[in-house]
Image: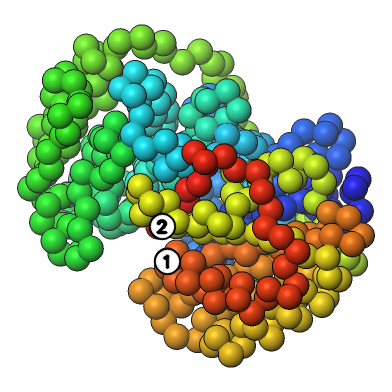
Amino acid sequence: MGSVGRTRVGKYELGRTLGEGTFAKVKFAKDVETGESVAIKIFEKDKILRHKMVGQIKREISTMKLIRHPNVIRMYEVIASKTKIYLVLEFVDGGELFDKIARNGKLKEDEARKYFQQLINAVDYCHSRGVFHRDLKPENLLLDATGVLKISDFGLSALPQQVREDGMLYTTCGTPNYVAPEVIKDKGYDGAKADIWSCGVILFVLMAGYLPFEETNLVSLYKKIFKAAFSCPNWFSTSAKKLIKRILDPNPQTRIAIPQIIENEWFKKGYQPPQFETADVNPVDVDAIFDESEEATNLVVERRKEKPDAMNAFDLISTSQGLNLGTLFEKQMGLVKRETRFTSKLPANEILSKIEEACKPMGFDVKKQNYKLKLQGEKSGRKGHLAIATEVFEVAPSLHVVELRKAKGDTLEFYKFFKSLSTGLKDIMWKPLEGTSESDKSGRED
């Protein structure tokens, strides 16, 4: 389909949305000068200012400019328009490590060890630069096409200047199931030791296929974490069990440190230290990207499209892991997808109108922009208000792909919403997109 209908930001041509969160979305893009594929993380300036997120965004940018490691997502550059900030990142097309676990269940011990070795290498490097991630979990670990692990999402990372005079951090953050007990207690913690605990939880999940600490009640979950009340399944080797118990030590003073992990016999099996060159990194003037003055010369212009984005063969292939609408449930792991798609032969505007008609009686506020809809649930659910991003892509003049993604809220509620919506849209759905094998029928709830 070429580049018909694409949006341009500087030298980058934006494609489909790869992910969406409360404060940012990530889009696939191509450098039109070199043809290189990249991922661009986009922040709305007004939303950042409104929610007092400037410090966090500056921290993420500063962090990523400090880090140059083969197991960490690389940031190429930062650009800004009058209304948006764009982080141009390395594009990693192998999916999340979480998806691999969701599809296949637990990993074999040798494979889990390989990923754990790469994770420890990257975390050790970050710590040597005074950077603590603070939200390590499988969802933030990506895989490239060759299976190399890459750490992403430094939005909660801490830099040296955030460490107080006593050497401790004091911000409680992260994902509850992966958070170290001393972080929850909120009495100050060592960022390196807290990251090591999260690495231990990740290793357990890779080998077991489930979490060591899991409760629906947060107080009960915290009690388990405080006591490190978990047990390793019988298929773990004795040496793996010993290492995990030393990592998941609730006392940070006696918890094993990274140099000791690297010397551990179980860890050392097949270990290959990372090979890379330390490049000189030029600091980014993070204040300049928030420059609102008329004299600002570093701003790019986002060129608006006049028709839906074209979804070419590459885009279709890149979505192949999540194409089958009939497999939203994964029976084995009880996991639910966060996005889904269907095709329609109707014109784009008519598709959007039909979705809008179907959503309003279900209690959703609908906002339309170009060929996208933002659906906001009026009632608060289990994880707040459900918000859904909908976008129409053109595959051919008479064929469109409609993508629905959960932006906020509970994934199970998104699944129920889509079941109700699809009933009302039967007359516009041509047929579900296909392309997943039996082993791919998975998603997740987060």
Give the amino acid type for the residue marked by disc 1 in the picture: Leu
Label 2: state its secondary structure: loop
Circles 1, 2 touching at the beta carbon (< 8 Å):
yes
348 to the left or right of 201: right
The residue drawn where x is 52% and y is 81% is 377
96 to the left or right of 343: left
Rendered location of residue 355, percent (x, y): 69, 78
* Image height of 262 relative to 308, above or below: above
* Residue at the spot of label 2: 445
* Image height of 64 relative to 17, above or below: above
The residue drawn where x is 15% and y is 50% is 225
Q: Answer with mark 1 or mark 2, whichever residue precedes in sequence.
A: 1
The residue drawn where x is 83% and y is 34% is 35
Label 1 neighbour load within 10 Å: few <14, some 14-19, many 20+: some
Q: Nearer the viewer, residue 288 or 278?
A: 278
* Residue at the spot of label 1: 412
User: Marks 1/2: CA distance?
Assistant: 7 Å
* Image height of 350 relative to 158, above or below: below
Label 2 neighbour load within 10 Å: few <14, some 14-19, many 20+: some
Query: Could one spot residue 202 in this view of the protein?
Result: no
* Image height of 245 relative to 406, above or below: above
Rendered location of residue 51, percent (x, y): 50, 72
Tell me which colouring the rendered structure shows.
rainbow
